[in-house]
């Protein structure tokens, strides 16, 4: 029988190894799997390369993981925002590496990684510093740069509901990077508000089919990053 | 919309007036992505008889205004990470699909802020290149290369009075030859093969006043004044 | 106001020009927009390049379009099947050109076309006759071929329901190529069983957002290709 | 499963027995794509205590058996265009997403028919190269290059008695070095760096009988016979 439900959130992240590449879903706080990230902090893996659109806010969730010194490198499109101080400090102190990728190129590189496409051409970034050193080619009179697929050892994502097969649906704009990260990681771990029986999700509306998911953890009442930050919370 | 003569220190349009001016040029039925900052204000000024569909790159087509107090969902936000709503007929999708809309040329209009715009339509809007700055690009490079038309909405000059419309951008570029039109507090200006083409002066602003604050020659409005309301893409 | 509903199916296809490239949804009969195809036959455009996974069956739908001599070239993965005689005859007689593309490469080329990606690398077809003459490149020790994005002037697709914005949902495996074709065509025309009011489709479950659709035609009771073929029907 | 001695013209397994034999090697929890022809029969023989998820490249994960008579939907079909059902926990998706599963290496096993398999694991299964043939490739080239393991399920010889397992394929290739294991009416054979490695003979079939009908040397089962039930990918 296929049963990807994992009752223990710490066991769910227990095999993330030092030096792993970890994709973490979320655009700002929407879709950020904050409980999985906190479990990863407890777990202790370090020297991580983290792929996320941002770098977290306050000192909870992704920002807490960075503050704990566990992240050697960030791959992201927008590493600063309101209430984001942890990454900027470490970056200025030379303690963390940054690979800056345009947001659409980041999304497409992740999709390509999951789709078995090692590289593709895009017009995004042509003529900018982010295209320097990259292969350029002209198609029908327009210049493009070659970008490479991005894969990961693990993905940590957040959904609204899932079944034991790992089929996942999302909530509004919390969907963002999660479905493509699920395809690009060798092991995908998802936290959801609710676990439902097989058949409880309309097959026409499943966004992430279970083949892309390895472990499902139910977190019925996840924390809200913005509320924690407003309250000055800090993890651990 | 007329300039307030009692407050001579304010020449040209306010932020809201700039947004309103640009909104007049968005045609009925357009698919539009509004950048962070002044561009976000534009949606509030589109004439009521036009239906415009707003895209936010974090996965929503059919974005509506901010929710009533206490009714928001922290997982229903725009690219500026502010809470929004979804209109009837909206659709959610993931980030790769969202940038299919952008990169694939499906959106009609992108409205963005700017640090600098060159006479050739180059845009710099993501980094001053300062050594201690945290570089952050977001979706701007994808938008300028993918969307049908790119309108810049910006103050004509920096806070220090330097022109933002220049011969050549000195800041790191967002895109090359990508800007179609510029809306500032002082004027509306098209980027053309001949250079910066004045389309319209803000009320009470003279050609010379704008030229003095522009880092490249400004072509005067041709006579007779045939104002276009260009719908690209 | 945005209203993409088009009450007249003949007007819906009325600007398809001679020599146009037309993507037609469907895998076998599932998802085949048979009424739109018949309207295209009535319309008379010829010299078409048609992109479809197959080449139709019997003498209705796509097979009828080919039988009418309107198709100069087919781009597909599987041009023969049970009850498929029209294409084989024309092909053997040298009356129609064939570009044979592996099914996954066909799907990805269409997606790339819609996504503004001019070219990508894939391992599919390496070492086979279908890779001959194509650029090869090695990534991490494995060989890949360069494939190009595919776009079209028009897409004809079939959905289950749509609203006036052009948001579309599908039925089961009739979805197949339709969502990606909608992105890759300059003008996308969809026939649906049912038109619903805006808000009548769950925004979490919309498969083709309206931005990709230009015209919506309601065909409440579409014909079934297999039934027509079994009955020996022929169009026109 | 034993050979019927009263019918000496039938040596080796029937089509159903071949499918049953392969089904024994599909592990619990596997994601499997079954090709058209004999491979379609495999699903009916997987032991009841194993849960296997079937993928069909036309957009369904969680494919179930054929519907009861009169209950089918002509828009719910498999890659062979036969009507099927969807099990609870199934998901529908479009063709590009379907081949993300294939090309991206997410499926565990692809079971395909063959015209020829070479000693190096090359597969030819889409064209005899005959000048008047209509070439048709479908998803086979994607499957063999993307899926974790490729099992070929085929008669050992052609209808004309020629070996399908050969030193070198003479028909146009589907993929190079892609086949992991071959199940025929006569034997189970692994493709190894050393060549065709016999894993198991069908009941009543001798090594010599299979070797005579195989176009390349067959390595005998090592002693002691350690049969592997390999779960690739």
Image: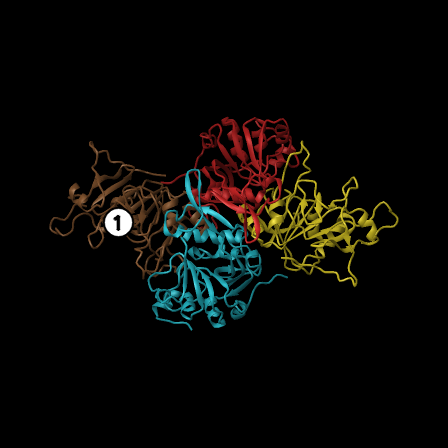
Chain colours: A cyan, B brown, C red, D yellow
Q: Quadrant of the C terminus of chain D?
A: bottom right
- Within 10 angstroms of label 1, few (less than 14), some, or many (20 or more) residues? many
Q: Secondary structure at mark 1?
A: loop
Q: How many marks?
A: 1
Vertically, is C24 above or below B40?
Answer: above
Q: Can you give x and y, in whole percent of width and height, for residue D216 in the image?
A: 76, 48
* Residue positioned most to the right: D6
Residue at the spot x=69%, y=54% of the render? Answer: D193
State the image coordinates of residue C170 (x, y, percent, origin top left). Answer: 52, 45
Q: Is residue B39 left or right of residue A136?
A: left
* x, y percent for residue A135: 45, 48
Report the side of C101 relative to D206 (left or right). left
Q: As rendered, which of B106 and A68 lies closer to the eye?
A: A68
Whether residue A78 is visible here, answered yes or no, is: yes
The residue singled out by tag 1 in the image is B154
Locate residue B69 relative to residue D64 in the image: left or right. Answer: left
Q: Where residue D58 appears, x then y in whole percent?
A: 58, 45
Toward the front, the furthest residue is A133
Q: Is C235 or A93 nearer to us in this picture?
A: A93
* On-image quarter of the N terminus of chain D: bottom right
Q: Is residue A192 visible?
A: no
Horizontal side of D4 relative to D70 (left or right) equals: right
Viewer-proximal residue among A107 and C16: A107
The numbered mark 1 sits on a residue in which chain? B
Residue D232 location, quadrant: bottom right
Q: Residue at x 22, y 46 (%)?
A: B215
Which quarter of the figure has residue B127? bottom left
Q: Residue at x 50, y 26 (%)?
A: C44
């Amino acid at each position: 029988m296929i049963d990807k439900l994992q009752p223990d959130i710490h066991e769910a992240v227990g095999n993330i190894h030092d030096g792993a590449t970890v994709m973490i879903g979320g655009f700002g706080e929407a879709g950020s799997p904050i409980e999985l990230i906190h479990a990863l902090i407890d777990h202790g893996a370090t020297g991580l390369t983290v792929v996320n659109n941002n770098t977290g806010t306050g000192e909870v969730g992704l920002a807490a993981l960075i503050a704990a010194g566990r992240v050697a490198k960030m791959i992201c499109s927008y590493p600063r925002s309101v209430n984001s101080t942890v990454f900027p400090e470490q970056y200025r102190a030379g303690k963390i590496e940054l690979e800056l990728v345009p947001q659409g190129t980041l999304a497409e590189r992740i999709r390509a990684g999951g789709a078995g496409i090692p590289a593709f051409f895009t017009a995004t970034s042509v003529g900018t510093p982010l295209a320097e050193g990259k292969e350029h080619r002209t198609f029908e009179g327009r210049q493009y740069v070659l970008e490479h697929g991005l894969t990961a050892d693990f993905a940590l994502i957040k959904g609204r509901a899932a079944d034991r097969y790992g089929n996942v649906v999302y909530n509004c704009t919390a969907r963002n990077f999660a479905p493509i990260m699920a395809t690009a990681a060798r092991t995908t771990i998802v936290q959801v508000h609710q676990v439902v029986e097989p058949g409880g999700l309309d097959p026409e509306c499943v966004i992430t089919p279970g083949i892309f998911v390895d472990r499902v953890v139910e977190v019925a009442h996840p924390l809200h990053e913005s509320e924690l930050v407003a309250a000055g919370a800090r993890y651990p | 919309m007329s300039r307030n003569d009692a407050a001579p220190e304010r020449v040209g349009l306010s932020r809201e007036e700039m947004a309103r001016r640009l909104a007049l040029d968005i045609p009925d039925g357009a698919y539009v992505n509004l950048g962070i900052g002044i561009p976000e204000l534009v949606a509030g000024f589109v004439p009521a008889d036009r239906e415009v569909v707003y895209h936010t790159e974090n996965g929503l087509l059919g974005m509506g205004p901010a929710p009533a107090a206490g009714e928001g969902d922290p997982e229903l936000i725009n690219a500026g990470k502010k809470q929004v709503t979804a209109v009837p007929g909206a659709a959610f999708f993931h980030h790769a699909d969202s940038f299919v809309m952008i990169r694939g040329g499906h959106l009609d209009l992108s409205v963005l802020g700017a640090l600098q715009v060159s006479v050739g339509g180059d845009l710099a809007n993501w980094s001053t290149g300062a050594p201690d700055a945290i570089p952050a690009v977001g979706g701007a490079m994808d938008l300028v290369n993918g969307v049908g038309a790119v309108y810049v909405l910006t103050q004509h000059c920096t806070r220090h009075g330097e022109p933002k419309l220049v011969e050549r951008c000195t800041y790191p570029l967002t895109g090359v030859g990508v800007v179609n039109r510029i809306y500032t507090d002082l004027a509306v200006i098209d980027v053309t093969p001949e250079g910066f083409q004045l389309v319209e002066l803000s009320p009470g602003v003279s050609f010379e006043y704008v030229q003095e604050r522009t880092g490249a020659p400004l072509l005067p409005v041709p006579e007779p004044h045939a104002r276009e309301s260009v719908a690209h893409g």
